[in-house]
């Protein structure tokens, strides 16, 4: 007899929502469309407290002009004083208070039916939760009284919960959970679920369950968005309709938009690293059902893959992608609206003239494979006797020719024609002239240009942007590089040769559709080189004084300096479309 | 004290204004001076100006020199704009000077000459040339009119704007010669077609090559010209001197300055202008003494002048920000002036802006209200570097009634009628919502009132 009784007691405890150790999905209504949770915030806070890099980061942040200035402002001083009062009232440091409040998890939900948002903090214990809330409410009441105002919250009871109602939001303590919401109806619904397992909740939705099952074990935070419901409720929401309506948007987002227009939900996992954080967004997408219109984006059978990203010295950004631009333009009628198609038709006519009457979309773009790369890097101006006032990075497009033998000569001639054309137009406008130069690089060749500054412009006070560009074209085996400077084209060709000789590149096995990687070193140098220009533009665009503009720009530059590098990868599996974003801040560690 | 408008005694009109009591010299008088000689003044400046005499105020104004700090930040903006080739940011650069500068009369005169020697960025697309002309106008704004005309005549932007960047002896370009007399120096009907043809011959050989003026002796007609009552082998410089020497020249410029500073209409009689014209000529066409005389005169402070001008879009918008120590997104701000009809560096035609009553019509009136509404709704729009509420508090404007009263003194040429005053006070007192937004809404309403359209 004892065994069945014990089993029954255990069953009651295990099924009781008060004992549930999983996330807060059981507490939220089935109609919830946005759900987010952080599993063990307490651990995260403790890890941050114990991390020696955090004090270094805090010190670095204080050195940022805008933050240093904000910390000295009255509001900031008052906030610190208030924090001190709270710590004194509760007899604990604020980090301990925060940890105690969120020890067992944080859940957020948005319910469109009640138009309510709710935040559920799962505290370390009911006792400490009550103690903290009592202390905070007491302080708020005393503050209001000292200002001659009425108490900000009215306390009431709802079931076994203590409920506090304010003007704009309410909160309640139910067992060891603190429930904050802007809609009482939603708050009551959550408190009901805490005390009594609801028959219907977000947890029983099949889509949610399916998404939940796919959650990464490494993630500390998780997000679920019910796209199907949002789509049906917001039919005019452009982002979810699958159309970009312009070629630029289509190249960048076309496939993602298609995914968003069909996927039932979106999930995101947040994963912290030692000196990095990454987020993985995912939507269900059946590769076999990708529309014909988006073959240019995903490739045949959805298996189009980008090349391994090229990395050169001073690299700022590299985007490597699979995009069949020729195919996209052939499908333009289905993809774009009338106005965009008109624009494309005009561009086609103009570009075809430049390429000796050959069709730009079919003959020119069609001569390349869909594996394209954009490389952006710092440029040195040592080669120039006149340096531009605004310094832009060099950039290059790297493409693979389908038939190098047949197309290389034609592109070489077109490039030289274009330089001749620019020189004629430039001469009419008094712009600098370009001199052509030819060289062999390893197995390839480079046609570069050199800027010749007119004699009467050598001492000009303000040097225009054109001095940033000395175009070049290079070839190596199947690769064609068209670059804004010979320096970058040369670096790319050299790097490609070195990678080919090494045969294995660490990223040669990249399987993503699109990879974007950036380094903040180059961005930092670039911002520093253009600091004066940025300050001037800030004064014009924000109406700031010079001192205000300097503070804002210098702060931005310092913030960039905190980070190290980042990476974005768009890839697809047989049944999902995934976007992984990561950013690292190794430099903080170095500052320790 | 103030004679009727149809019988103004010129001697009285241009005699220095000498107030005898507090009623004759109040904050309203000082605010009037700053609105006309500049773009309005904040409360502190009004207080500082009140103990000064009208003559001292005008004398100080004509001798103001821009601070090194403003010149330095202005130069930094110029470098940035030119480096980016930003023709469209030039108006914002000038607005920055108008808002931050201390030599406000010089800036106001530069705008006057910009309208007088109109050259538009719509045709001259090179920002460097437009800036060079702008510097020229600023340098001579209160200086020697003859020197300015000589330099403008060789200014590449001007010559390009008037299609006179190439002038050959076989086909003299009459465009510049006509505008020099009609628009720049003498006025319409003060010359003959023969004078235009002869003056055009003087300018042959004047060219612009690679954005610089140059004289091409091979294209110059060195034959004898008969210009007005003079005969000789005149070159371009001599042609300009002959035109400047005409009696109509000081009369034309003085009359235009009186309309600019005193009243849009009703003061054009030659008798009234004559004493100024004589003084202008006798001073060797020096602009500062003429402007000083106008700004310190009985007529300037009389009922013939107060609220007798329509605010230009620049006076309307820049005056508003300057008076309340405002700052905002200068690019958006300057672009919005286009809808009001006055985009700096882009005058509508060779005649510049007509001004006066033409500033106001149903379309521009609506645009003015919309512009102020947008300006005050922008987060970048700050007063004294912060919120409007904080600004009012910092000025010690304690209650809504005082806020409305101070705004009236600062911004209006005529007292606010009691009905509007009560309405605005009530709006501030009893309106609901964010106090900052309420105050901004009330201010937008304030500057949309018909009385604010008058200077």
Image (cartoon, coloured by chain):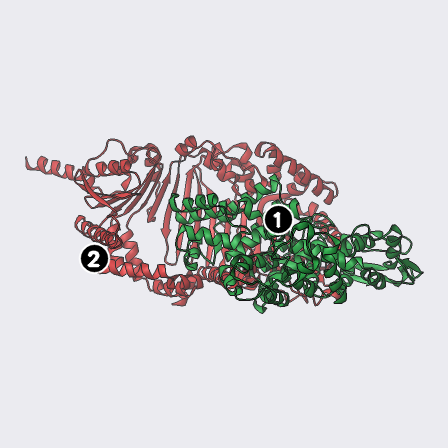
Chain colours: A red, B green
Q: Position of residue B449 (x, y in %)?
A: 53, 44
Query: Is disc 2 in the same subunit as disc 1?
Result: no
Q: Position of residue B71 (x, y in %)?
A: 60, 66
Mark 1 neighbour density, 10 Å: few (under 14) some (14–19) many (20 or more)? many
Q: Please say if A219 is above or below A73.
A: above
Q: Which residue is mark 2?
A: A90
Q: Residue at x 40, y 64 (%)?
A: A68
Callout 2 secondary element = helix
Compared across the picture, whether A299 is left or right of B150 comes to left
Q: Please say if B366 is above or below B406.
A: above
Q: Are marks 2 and 1 in contact (CB under 8 Å)?
A: no
Q: Please say if A61 is above or below B445.
A: below
Observer-nearest of B68 and A223: B68
Compared across the picture, whether B221 is left or right of B133 comes to right
Observer-nearest of A50 and A308: A50
Q: Distance of mark 2 from mark 1, alpha carbons? A: 65 Å
Q: Position of residue B355 (x, y in %)?
A: 66, 48
Callout 1 secondary element = loop
Camera sees residue A467 = no
Q: How many marks?
A: 2
Label 1: chain?
Answer: B
Observer-nearest of A67 and B68: B68
Observer-nearest of B325 and A409: B325
Compared across the picture, whether A420 is left or right of B447 comes to right
Residue A499, label in figure: none
Q: Which residue is mark 1?
A: B310
Compared across the picture, whether B229 is left or right of A491 comes to right
Label 2: chain?
Answer: A
């Amino acid at each position: 007899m004892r065994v069945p009784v014990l089993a029954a007691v255990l069953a009651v405890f295990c099924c009781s929502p008060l004992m549930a150790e999983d996330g807060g999905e059981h507490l939220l209504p089935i109609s919830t469309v946005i759900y987010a949770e952080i599993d063990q915030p307490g651990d995260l806070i403790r890890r941050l407290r114990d991390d020696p890099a955090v004090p270094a980061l805090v010190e670095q942040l204080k050195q940022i002009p805008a933050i240093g200035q904000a910390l000295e402002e009255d509001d900031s001083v008052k906030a610190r004083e208030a924090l001190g009062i709270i710590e004194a009232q509760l007899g604990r440091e604020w980090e301990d208070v925060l940890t105690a409040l969120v020890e067992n998890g944080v859940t957020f939900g948005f319910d469109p039916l009640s138009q309510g948002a709710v935040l559920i903090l799962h505290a370390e214990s009911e006792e400490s939760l009550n103690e903290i809330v009592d202390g905070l409410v007491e302080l708020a009441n005393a503050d209001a009284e000292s200002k001659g105002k009425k108490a900000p919250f009215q306390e009431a009871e709802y079931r076994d919960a203590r409920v506090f109602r304010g003007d704009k939001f309410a909160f309640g303590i139910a067992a060891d959970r603190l429930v904050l919401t802007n809609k009482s109806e939603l708050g009551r619904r959550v408190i009901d679920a805490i005390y009594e397992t609801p028959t219907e909740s977000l947890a029983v939705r099949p889509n949610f369950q399916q998404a939940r099952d796919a959650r990464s074990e490494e993630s500390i935070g998780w997000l679920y968005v019910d796209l199907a419901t949002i789509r049906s409720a917001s039919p005019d929401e452009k982002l979810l309709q699958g159309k970009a309506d312009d070629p630029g948007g289509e190249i960048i987002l076309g496939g993602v938009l298609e995914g968003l227009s069909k996927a039932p939900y979106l999930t995101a996992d947040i994963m912290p690293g030692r000196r990095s954080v990454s987020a993985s967004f995912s939507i269900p997408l059946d590769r076999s059902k990708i529309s014909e219109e988006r073959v240019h984006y995903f490739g045949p059978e959805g298996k189009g893959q980008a090349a391994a990203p090229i990395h050169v010295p001073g690299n700022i950004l590299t985007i490597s992608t699979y995009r069949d631009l020729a195919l996209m333009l052939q499908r333009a009628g289905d993809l774009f609206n009338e106005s965009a198609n008109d624009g494309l038709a005009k561009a086609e006519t103009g570009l075809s003239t430049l390429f000796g009457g050959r069709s730009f979309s079919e003959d020119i773009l069609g001569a390349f494979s869909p594996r394209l790369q954009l490389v952006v890097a710092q440029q040195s101006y040592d080669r120039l006797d006149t340096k531009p006032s605004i310094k832009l990075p060099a950039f290059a497009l790297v493409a693979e020719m389908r038939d190098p033998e047949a197309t290389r000569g034609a592109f070489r001639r077109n490039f030289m024609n274009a330089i001749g054309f620019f020189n004629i137009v430039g001469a009419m406008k008094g712009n600098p002239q370009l001199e052509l130069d030819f060289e062999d690089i390893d197995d390839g060749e480079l046609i570069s240009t050199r800027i010749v500054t007119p004699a009467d412009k050598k001492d000009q006070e303000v040097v225009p942007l054109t001095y940033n560009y000395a175009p070049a074209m290079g070839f190596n085996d199947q690769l064609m590089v068209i670059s804004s400077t010979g320096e970058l084209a040369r670096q790319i060709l050299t790097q490609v040769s070195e990678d080919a000789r090494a045969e294995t590149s660490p990223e040669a096995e990249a399987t993503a559709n699109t990879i974007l990687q950036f380094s903040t070193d180059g961005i930092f140098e670039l911002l520093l080189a253009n600091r004066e220009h940025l300050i001037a533009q800030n004064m014009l665009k924000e109406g700031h004084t010079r001192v205000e503009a300097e503070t804002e720009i210098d702060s931005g530059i310092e913030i960039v300096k905190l980070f190290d590098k980042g990476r974005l990868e768009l890839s697809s599996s047989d049944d999902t479309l995934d976007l992984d974003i990561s950013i690292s801040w190794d430099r903080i560690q170095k500052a320790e | 004290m103030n004679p009727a408008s149809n019988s103004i005694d010129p001697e009285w009109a241009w005699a220095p204004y000498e107030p005898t009591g507090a009623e004759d010299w109040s904050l309203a008088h000082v605010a009037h001076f700053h609105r006309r000689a500049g773009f309005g003044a904040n409360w502190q400046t009004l207080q500082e100006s009140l103990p000064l005499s009208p003559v001292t105020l005008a004398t100080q104004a004509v001798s103001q020199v821009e601070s090194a700090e403003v010149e330095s930040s202005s130069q930094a903006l110029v470098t940035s704009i030119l480096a980016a080739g930003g023709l469209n940011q030039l108006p914002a650069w000038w607005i920055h000077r108008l808002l931050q500068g201390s030599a406000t009369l010089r800036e106001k005169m530069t705008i006057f000459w910009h309208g007088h020697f109109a050259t538009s960025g719509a045709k001259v697309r090179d920002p460097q040339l437009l800036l060079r002309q702008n510097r020229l106008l600023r340098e001579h704004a209160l200086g020697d009119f003859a020197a300015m005309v000589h330099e403008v005549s060789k200014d590449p932007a001007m010559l390009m704007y008037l299609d006179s960047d190439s002038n050959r002896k076989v086909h003299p370009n009459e465009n510049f010669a006509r505008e020099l007399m009609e628009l720049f120096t003498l006025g319409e009907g003060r010359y003959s077609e023969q004078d235009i043809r002869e003056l055009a011959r003087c300018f042959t050989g004047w060219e612009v090559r690679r954005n610089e003026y140059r004289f091409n002796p091979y294209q110059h007609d060195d034959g004898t010209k008969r210009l007005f009552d003079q005969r000789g082998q005149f070159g371009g410089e001599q042609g300009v001197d002959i035109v400047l020497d005409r009696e109509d020249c000081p009369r034309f410029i003085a009359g235009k300055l009186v309309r600019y500073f005193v009243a849009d209409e009703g003061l054009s009689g030659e008798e009234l202008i004559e004493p100024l014209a004589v003084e202008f000529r006798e001073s060797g066409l020096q602009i500062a003494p003429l402007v000083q005389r106008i700004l310190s005169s009985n007529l300037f402070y009389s009922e013939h002048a107060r609220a007798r001008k329509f605010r230009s879009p620049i006076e309307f918008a820049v005056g508003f920000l300057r008076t309340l120590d405002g700052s905002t997104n200068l690019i958006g701000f300057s672009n919005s002036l286009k809808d009001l009809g006055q985009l700096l560096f882009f005058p509508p035609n060779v005649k510049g802006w007509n001004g006066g009553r033409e500033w106001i019509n149903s379309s521009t009136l609506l645009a003015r209200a919309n512009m102020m509404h947008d300006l005050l709704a922008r987060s970048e729009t700050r007063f004294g570097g912060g919120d409007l509420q904080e600004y009012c508090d910092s000025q010690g404007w304690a209650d809504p009634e005082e806020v409305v009263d101070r705004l009236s003194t600062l911004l209006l040429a005529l007292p606010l009628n009691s009905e509007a005053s009560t309405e605005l006070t009530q709006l501030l007192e009893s309106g609901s919502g964010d106090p900052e937004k309420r105050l901004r809404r009330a201010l937008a309403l304030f500057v949309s009132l018909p009385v604010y359209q008058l200077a």
